[in-house]
């Protein structure tokens, strides 16, 4: 192992920094999505408002405001997906200019590792993170497109009223059937709200990957700074998920 590290220009400190980085990233994902604390995150609280939105959507006629809101959300996802592709392309160009980059880094007094192999591995790490983010944004965009279709396919309030009035005049079992139609619309709203929350989850995961990519970029300078940047990003994301002012206001609205 020592020989492999030396041949690449890395040290045990570099290896420890990389392992700590991935451990922090995975731990953060688990905490905000699967742990018992995830109910306190801002994303979980916002999922309730997504459900409320869809519950109002099935009762709203026409549904053009819902379509406009959803289109606006999709534009944001598309922006991040396009930016990810551009960043991956720029980093690919950085691989082709390894010699020039190593020479530039060698002139900086605080850079500890300036080998070509080290540069290429660090670039590949950042490329991997932005590629991962792109897949998350692309899937989120696709899910939001499906949600948009489901908004268009949602029950029409005026049609349901006319159907129930027709049932009222023609059958004695009108009330149970009207109740059935309402429960069907409610179930539809719950399902669409859950699908919307799933798309938002993938989008949030992609945005968080951008933060960790910023920490990984510090590795170009020094592994000790890489440690510090990983801790800093983890703290920032923890605060935004659990301790942000926006989250506190949401919590106060639920009381």
Image (cartoon, rainbow, N blue to C red):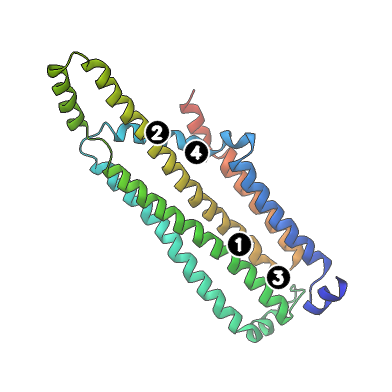
The dot on residue 246 is 4
The local crowd at label 3, few if under 14, some if 14 to 19, many if 20 or more residues have their Cα within 10 Å, is some
Give the residue pinned by disc 1.
214
Which is more foreground, mark 4 or mark 1? 1
Residue drawn at x 40%, y 37% as measured from the top left = 191
The local crowd at label 4, few if under 14, some if 14 to 19, many if 20 or more residues have their Cα within 10 Å, is few
Which is more foreground, mark 4 or mark 2? 2
Placement of the N terminus among the 4 image quadrants: bottom right
Is residue 107 in view from this perspective?
A: no
Which is more foreground, mark 3 or mark 2? 2
Residue drawn at x 49%, y 33% as measured from the top left = 249
Earlier sequence position, callout 3 versus callout 2: 2
Alpha carbon distance from label 3 to label 1:
12 Å
Alpha carbon distance from label 4 to label 1:
24 Å
The local crowd at label 1, few if under 14, some if 14 to 19, many if 20 or more residues have their Cα within 10 Å, is some
Q: Is residue 96 left or right of residue 189?
A: right
Give the residue pinned by disc 3.
221
Earlier sequence position, callout 2 versus callout 1: 2
Earlier sequence position, callout 3 versus callout 4: 3
Question: Residue 254 in the image: x percent, y percent?
Answer: 47, 26
The dot on residue 190 is 2
């Amino acid at each position: 192992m020592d020989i492999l590290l030396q041949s690449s220009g890395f040290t045990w400190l570099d290896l420890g920094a990389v392992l700590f980085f991935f451990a922090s990233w995975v731990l953060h994902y688990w905490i905000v999505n699967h742990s018992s604390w995830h109910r306190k995150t801002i994303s979980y609280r916002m999922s309730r408002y997504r459900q409320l939105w869809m519950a109002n959507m099935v009762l709203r006629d026409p549904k053009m405001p819902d379509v406009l809101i959803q289109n606006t959300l999709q534009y944001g996802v598309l922006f991040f997906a396009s930016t990810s592709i551009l960043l991956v392309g720029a980093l690919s160009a950085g691989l082709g200019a390894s010699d020039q980059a190593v020479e530039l880094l060698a002139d900086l007094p605080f850079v500890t590792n300036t080998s070509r192999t080290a540069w290429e591995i660090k670039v590949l790490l950042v490329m991997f993170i932005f590629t991962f983010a792109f897949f998350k944004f692309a899937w989120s965009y696709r899910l939001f497109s499906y949600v948009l279709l489901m908004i268009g396919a949602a029950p029409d309030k005026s049609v349901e009223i006319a159907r129930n009035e027709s049932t009222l005049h023609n059958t004695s079992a009108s009330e149970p059937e009207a109740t059935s139609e309402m429960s069907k619309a409610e179930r539809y709203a719950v399902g669409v709200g859950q699908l919307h929350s799933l798309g938002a989850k993938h989008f949030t995961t992609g945005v968080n990957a951008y933060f960790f990519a910023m920490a990984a970029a510090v590795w170009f300078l020094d592994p000790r700074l890489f440690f510090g940047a990983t801790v800093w990003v983890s703290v920032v994301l923890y605060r935004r998920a659990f301790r942000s002012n926006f989250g506190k206001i949401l919590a106060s609205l639920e009381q």
